[in-house]
Image (cartoon, rainbow, N blue to C red):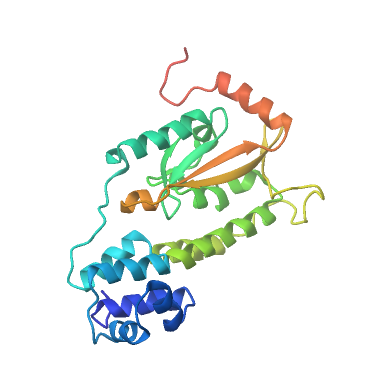
Amino acid sequence: MTSDGHAGALVRRWRTRRHRSQLDVAVSAGISTRHLSYVETGRSTPSRAMIERICDELDVPLRDRNEIYLAAGLAPAHRERPLTDLGPARAAVDAVLAGHEPNPAVAVNVRWDVLAANRAMQRFLADLPPALAGPPLNVLRATLHPEGLARRLRDGARWRAGLLRRVRRQHERVGDPALAELLAELESYPPPPGGDGDGAADDIAVPLRLAVDGGELSFLYTVTVFGSPRDVTLDEIAVETFFPADDATREALAALAGRWVPAGQAPT
């Protein structure tokens, strides 16, 4: 709850964050501008149905919707289960991770802490120093920290710039204070070694290029989220899948998959 002590203050905060006027939100949500004004100033306590309509219109994350319900004196509408209790959703995450082999894939939460990773991704994260290995293991910290993957990045300055833009957009969407702290930490790291040019003229996207023994691996990535989540954990899960950007990377990943054994597991 905010220092204003009512749900409307939270509604106003999210409307301001989304750069929306009262008139715009009221019309889109099917309520009067006067009623929305009364809600935001605390003169009227919103019903559960009104909170849901306004939050849908403002794309308020489920975690923050629960705060608005509580501030209005209502029970939270959305549960927060651990990943292991998400039933078919957890099975879907596992299926994506396993099915993406031998290419790397990882499931992360809203702060990019690792929730699950396939064997291919584990290979790239296996040699992190203890300070970065977690728990929790944070993908952003592991990528940009000077002792992490940053030392292996090619064209690191360009990749860092793009990654920081993603974090800023994520923070703008969710408003998580912990994410703001992480962003400040990442921005304090020295730029990774590597050129900062514009890359190849025929690039269709900025690739992640990693130096490895005997050469370089190059990846494109996609991000997958669940549609219409009702659980807080599910609302915050994203699955990042990396694809070979060239034939050499595709062949190298297949070869690595055939000879890598996780720590503590005997070779077969």
Numbered disc total: 0
Where residue 231 appears, x then y in whole percent? 31, 51
* 130 in relation to 249, above or below: below
Task: Estimate the x, y position of residue 88 in percent, counting from the top left.
Answer: 33, 36
Left or right: 52, with 155 as reference point? left
**Residue appearing at x 50%, y 63% in the figure:** 183
Residue 107 place in picture, x, y as percent: 44, 42
Q: Toward which corner of the image does residue 72 lie, by quadrant?
A: bottom left
Q: Residue at position x 32%, y 60% from top? A: 63
Is residue 97 rendered to the left or right of residue 70? right
Q: Which of 71 and 113 is in front in this view?
A: 71
Q: Which of 70 and 46 is in front in this view?
A: 46
Q: Can residue 258 be seen in this view?
A: yes
Q: Which of 155 and 168 is in front in this view?
A: 168
Residue 196, quarter of the rendered image: bottom right
Q: Nearer the viewer, residue 143 or 173?
A: 173
Residue at the extreme top of the image, as rendered = 268
Q: In this view, does 17 lie to the left or right of 69?
A: right
Can residue 214 be seen by looking at this rendering?
Answer: no
Quarter of the image with the N terminus in it:
bottom left
Extreme residue toward the right, this view: 201
Q: Position of residue 169 (x, y in %)?
A: 53, 63
